[in-house]
Amino acid sequence: MVLVSRNAAGTLFVGGALSLTLGSLLYPAVLGVQKVHSAPERVIATPATGPLTEADRDFVVEVRSAGLWEYPVGQMALRKGTTKAVRTAGEHLIDGRASLDAASREVAGRLDITLPNRPSPQQRGFVATLKADTGKKFDTDMVTLLRAVDGQALSTIASVRTTTRNSLVRALADRANDTDLDHLTVLEKTGLVDFGQVLPQETTAPTLPAQDMTPPPPAATQPQVVLTPQATSTLSPSPSVR
């Protein structure tokens, strides 16, 4: 994962518009995830579900981290979206991220992976900026931001899906791929995607764990976990496990 100046953290817009180029957007950096080591293929555990590499671990963390800020943005879209298409995108964000969060938390528990409980500084900056937006500006900024992030996520998901030897991580990648494709579809259907706008990078790692938590989703939106049907999803604090 790429390291850049911490001064960029929390900065999303310059003059109210997303800047830089799409080629500079690195999904793990946007998520606020920072690698602990420099050897992503290094095996760090050998559970019954298959060898676990550093890249596998980072991916599970990334899925959780994405939900900590995209879920609240989906809620904002329901309240502030000025068109039905934007509000529909918000519904998909809420449902998809809640389901992925549940799956990532179960995988983390079974593989002894510590998850973040708080969005990174840049992620909080994204949410704060969108909170301040109103009207059509909110619609455009929200769609452009989420489309860029989820679009870049697909390359990370594909890499993990094709290289992991752990069956739990592979199943999570399958679910993440389906969810991100769904989000891209509904975002593009709004007609507001600005393909020339992108995001800055950041390097601040998530806090593991933290006291400032994202509120859990309403009970009505809590889907069943894919990997363990008996569990339900919440964007609530996960236990600190190592």
Image (tube, rainbow, N blue to C red):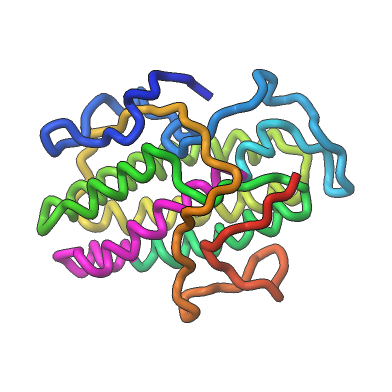
160 vs 85, left or right, is right
Q: Quadrant of residue 183?
A: bottom left
The boundaries of the magenta stretch are: 61-90
Of residues 238 and 226, the one nearer the viewer is 238
Does residue 95 lie above or below 182 as drawn?
below
46 vs 160, left or right, is right
The residue sitting at 72% across, 25% down in the picture is 41
How far from the left and from the top, in percent, is residue 118?
Answer: 49, 49
Does residue 208 lie above or below 72 as drawn?
above
**Quadrant holding the C terminus:** top right
Residue with the most extreme bottom position: 220
How far from the left and from the top, in percent, is residue 219?
Answer: 49, 79
How far from the left and from the top, in percent, is residue 191?
Answer: 19, 53
Badge count: 0
The residue sitting at 28% across, 62% down in the picture is 76
The residue sitting at 32% across, 36% down in the picture is 10
How far from the left and from the top, in percent, is residue 157?
Answer: 56, 40
Give the main secondary structure, helix, strand or loop, of the magenta stretch: helix
Q: Is residue 89 magenta?
A: yes
The residue sitting at 17% across, 53% down in the picture is 138
